Image (spheres, grey):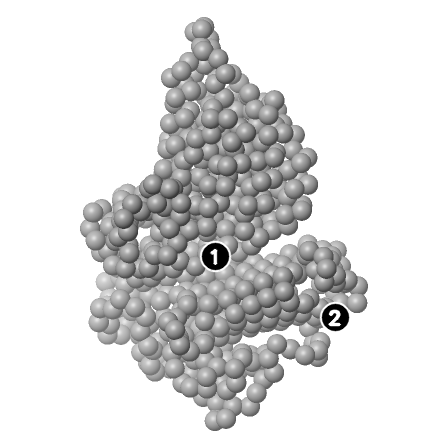
Amino acid sequence: MKMFLAVPKGRALLFPPKNSFGLIAILCLALVAHAGPSIPTRGFQSTEGLRFELPANGNLRIENLLGGVIAEVWKENYVSVVAINDSGRQSRSPAVIQRTDSLLSIRVARGTAGAPRINLQLRIPERAHTAIITSDGSVEVLGTPAALLIQTVSGEIRAELTKNVDADVVADTKTGNVSTSFSSVQVSQASRPQLQARLGKGGRAVKLFSQAGNITLATTGDESPRIAATTQATQPERREPLEPGELPSPKQRPELSGQNKSTAAAGTAAPPSTGPEEISEGDIIRIDTELVSVNVSVVDRGTNRGVNDLTKDDFRLYEDNVPQQIAHFDSASAPFNLVLLIDLSGSTTKVVDLIKAAALHFVEAARPFDRIGVITFAGGQVVVSPLTTDHEALRQRINAIERPQGSTKLYDSLAFGMDEVFREAKDSRRNAIVVISDGLDSVLPNVTGEGSKLPYEELVRRAKEFDGVVYSIWTDTQSYEPLSPLDIQQETFDLGHDRMKEMADVGGGAFYECEELKDLAGAYDRVVADLGTVYTLSYRPTKKVRDGSWRAIRVDVNRQNSVARGKRGYYAK
């Protein structure tokens, strides 16, 4: 379904929450001409920009791979966005803005060689759980949102927190320097992280990471040198934001024309297009509510190693065997939220130390920007560690693991893990669960104890709809030949194996067999390598009707001996 909204000059858009498809706005943000090589550090007073409501959980992700980001915290309940071209020329910037029930994502992808830099200037609500990601672009945040994560490769970072804020702050840069104007905070350039402190009573998480840039932690109003001083334009400044007119209160939701309306949509239907279009005064912004995104990993059949040099032209995508046009392609290695779900029931009692050692190995093998959580289970679940990038804390918590009591509730525990990712994930569009088990839930024949309340069929459905990928590592715990009808029979061991494999298949991940627990660390290595090569393909289905049916997705790779692995489809709700 496509909707066309007439946007008169002097108007802003406020998008309401959408259904499970989410909302994708593919648009060109009006640019503000500005001279100088860097984004300005002030200038919010007259430009409102485009407006977008936050989802109920406050999750906001901003990724700009073409420039920098400056964000100011304000009292409103929506996000204001303006794009700035720092070349001083009037032009347009394609950005993809996606809103689902759990995340508002604003993204500017990498351009071709020589593409002009684009910077984003935003105002964000106080309740926002905000993640900001750039490549070499600087990031400046004025004020303190509910949670803040900034990650950049070589850009400078400046965070001005409100005075008397209650926050837990971590700042680290590999080759740059960390500085602060908080007199109570100590910085040690020789330590990792270089800054780790509790301000006030703590509570709000503030995490600042740069590979090569400097990081400054300051208080609002601090006059210390900023990332970029505002420069005077060499020509009169021209602004073309979509200014707010009679805009409804952010709590109100303006009605959008859709397929169930009998009246024609406002404006003239735009010609068919495969990409973003420029916006002129009184022009139309195309709102496409049916963009489907698929995360796939590509491996070589012979070596099972990831293939990381593919381009958009190497992929062919089909829905229900009908070819689809790939509208957007992304091979960037954005951070993951990784949850290790470890079965500590039954015969694993005697090998807990091996399992701990393998989990520690996984932490070391994972990328430093990935957030890792650990959950163990038997008859219940124990959150050993919530999602965190603090590897030292992870190591301490893993070393303190104790075996949970009770039977084996694998299905309930995997559902718990998926819910835990959704609850904790604040900073990434990619989630993954790695479950290690022999697959013997106590609901299976002759497996002792109380089993899961969640039926296996329901678990399969949830894995299909999970916003992430599920990897499973099957461990062989069969230590005897069944001699009695009361013993676990061979068919049950085989069923546990097969269900572990099916969980990975429907969850879009990979299945690994581990005959001996001493080989578990090697299995984790393979998972980490697989997670490191993930491509994102987005398309608009040619079949527009939303009838709740299952749509099968197939991705072919035009590379000899290569195969793509990912979700098999989705429900068109």
**Residue at 22% in and 68% down:** 272
The image shows residue 384 at horizontal and vertical percentages of 62, 38
Q: Is residue 177 visible?
A: yes
Q: Which mark is residue 273?
A: none
**Residue at 47% in and 79% down:** 84
The image shows residue 123 at horizontal and vertical percentages of 54, 71
Residue 90 figure quarter: bottom left
The image shows residue 177 at horizontal and vertical percentages of 67, 67
Residue ranking furthest to the bottom = 235
The residue that label 2 is drawn on is: 181
Q: Measure how far apart labels 2 and 1 are at the Cα level.
A: 31 Å
Q: Amino acid at mark 1?
A: Ala
Q: Amino acid at mark 2?
A: Ser
Mark 1 or mark 2, which is nearer the start of the sequence?
A: 2
Residue ranking furthest to the right = 184
257 sits to left or right of 51? left
426 sits to left or right of 328? right
* Vertical arrangement, residue 66 with respect to residue 403, above or below: below
Out of 147 and 546, give the one closest to the viewer. 147
- Provide the secondary structure element on which disc 2 rests: loop
How many numbered tags mark residues here? 2
The residue that label 1 is drawn on is: 334
| Crowding at mark 2 (Cα within 10 Å: few <14, some 14-19, many 20+) | some
Q: Nearer the viewer, mark 2 or mark 1?
A: 1
For the N terminus, the quadrant is bottom left
324 sits to left or right of 410? left
Residue ranking furthest to the front = 303
| Crowding at mark 1 (Cα within 10 Å: few <14, some 14-19, many 20+) | some
Out of 436 and 267, give the one closest to the viewer. 436
